[in-house]
Image: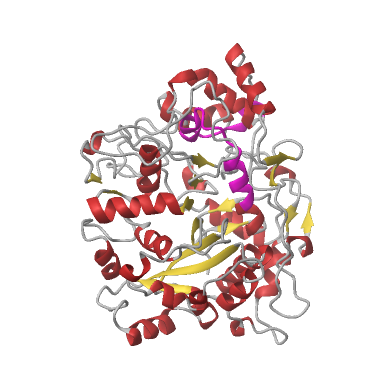
Amino acid sequence: MRYLPVARRFIPGAAVALFIITFLTTRSSFSLRGPLVWTSTSETASACQIWPGWEASDSGRLSYDACHKATTSPLIGDVGVLGDPNRCLLASSRLDQYYSSPDRNWSEVRWGQAQRQCAAREYKLSPLESSVDQIWRLPEASQKAEPPLEGNKGRVAVVLRTWDNYEYTEKRLAWLRALIAEVSLQRAGNYQVFFLVNVKDPDIHLEEDDAAYEQALIKFVPEEFRDMAVLFNERTLKAWYPLVEEHGAQDQMYQALQIFSYKFKQYDFIWQLEMDLRFTSHVHETLESAATFSRAQSRRNLWERNGRFYIPDLHNNSYEKFSAAVEAEIGDRGIWGPVSTSEFTSQGRQPPSRTKWNWGVGEDADLISFMPMIDPVGTNWVYEDVIKGFADGIHTPRRVAIVSITRSSRRLLQLVHEAQQDRGQWLVSEATLETFALLHGLKAVTVPHPIFFDKEMTAEALDAEINKGPPQSKAGGMTPSMLYSKDGWVPGPWWGASYWFTGSGAENAWKAYIEGRRLPPMLLHPVKEK
């Protein structure tokens, strides 16, 4: 991971100055500790214990050290947006303890039970929560009248998307245990982790046949995770969404999550994570930092900020100056509230006057993504023309963000659920949540997390390569290299990136981290290690 410092530039102008003053004087729900460090202001509950005296998931009990200097200047993104970039969590400190030993046999832990016991300290749990299977397999009609329990506001589910032939090696098991402990047991059950298991055999009757479901659960999920896992297959999805002709995981990554959100009403927000995603910092703190950043964002020209990569060296390492530059370029021409299309009724709030610059500050985002949300029209993306059930067809306003690692609100997921179930409206995975958020006028935020590359390049050269589209979709335009086009792969820098949908950059970074390299808070994807 190398980085070349280059000359910085500043964009002047009265509009820029006004934006900076307004942004910095507006009260918001984040704290800024020194330059470029976004942290949550909410208090963290003491960690729950699996064994007496065991609190190793607590971030305060793990080992940290100064980060390697070469890792503090990413070409893309804010190095502090996911946590403190000067305090690197050592891999050995967090992972070594989760390998089974004569002292502790992790395979005997029941992670679902441990999480529920932890959550019961802070929340009123439904009796059904003792059995995840029971909630998941209840018929749809019996759940429609069941209201969510009072006193459960703010709960968050973390859903790990896995499949029936996933290989649970010792390294992967250690990572999964660390993730669950860090994200759930750290915060007394405010976050709760689940496995959403894609069973590839469509002929298994998972809904009607109790024995078949139990047999599949035993066959496909390690015993320690079974009480936090739910199973589905394409037969499940077809029954729920008969008006949609596509139910495969590649094109409909969110259908199973929509069902999950429908059934598990106690969760206001759901993180969807993939099994080949890795965190170099404490998972709970990373996700909270992303949510805190998103909550702090104003809606003014937010879609236009979402539509481009933040290259810090071009903005004096200041996201505020980047935002001001977007403001100077876009002005009052940015998206403001729901975007209209024929025969579509927006469920979002109508926006205030454009003079209310701080609209959205302090508001939780209905959608959080980690790649730019761009207009697919004119990109030559392989799925550019795939949109079904909308009156305006391919002329429907849309947005797309590659890599379906997101946080979505229950509100957004249920709006998609209703559109697919009642009207047969659908797009492919990468365009689903983004487009419905756009059309309903919901708050969506791209978190500018740090992305490193395995080759040296200047910030100007990278900017010319990846931000060459029109002002409202700078990371889009004709054949952006981050997308797979109708003509195949597009040459670009992404094969060595630390975050993309393929390539070797993330895997190499994770290996370096495991071997002792001190990395700042980062997301690495994809990591296929066994």
Asked which quadrant contains residue 134, the reply is bottom left
Q: Residue at x 58, y 72 (%)?
A: 171
**Residue 296 falls within the magenta-colored stretch:** yes
- Asked whether the viewer can see residue 275, the reply is no
Q: Which residues are magenta?
A: 288-316
Work out whether 338 lies above or below 367. Answer: above
User: How far across and down, in percent of the image, does residue 460 sit?
Assistant: 55, 26
User: How far across and down, in percent of the image, does residue 274 sit?
Assistant: 48, 60
Q: Between 111 and 222, which is closer to the camera in this rendering? A: 111
User: How far across and down, in percent of the image, does residue 195 sit?
Assistant: 48, 69
Asked which quadrant contains residue 101, the reply is bottom right
Asked which quadrant contains residue 48, the reply is bottom right
- Asked whether the viewer can see residue 321, the reply is yes
Q: Between 476 and 143, which is closer to the camera in this rendering? A: 143
Q: Between 510 and 353, which is closer to the camera in this rendering? A: 353
Q: Residue at x 52, y 44 (%)?
A: 365
Work out whether 309 lies above or below 94. Answer: above
Give the mark count: 0
User: How far across and down, in percent of the image, does residue 186 sit?
Assistant: 68, 64
**Residue 221 falls within the magenta-colored stretch:** no
Q: Residue at x 64, y 34 (%)?
A: 4
Work out whether 74 lies above or below 68. Answer: above
Work out which residue is located at the far top of the displayed protein and give it: 14
Describe residue 249's horizontal placement relative to residue 69 as left or right.
left
Q: Residue at x 47, y 51 (%)?
A: 408
Work out whether 170 lies above or below 214. Answer: above
Scheme of colours in the image: secondary structure
Describe residue 244's horizontal placement relative to residue 303 as left or right.
left
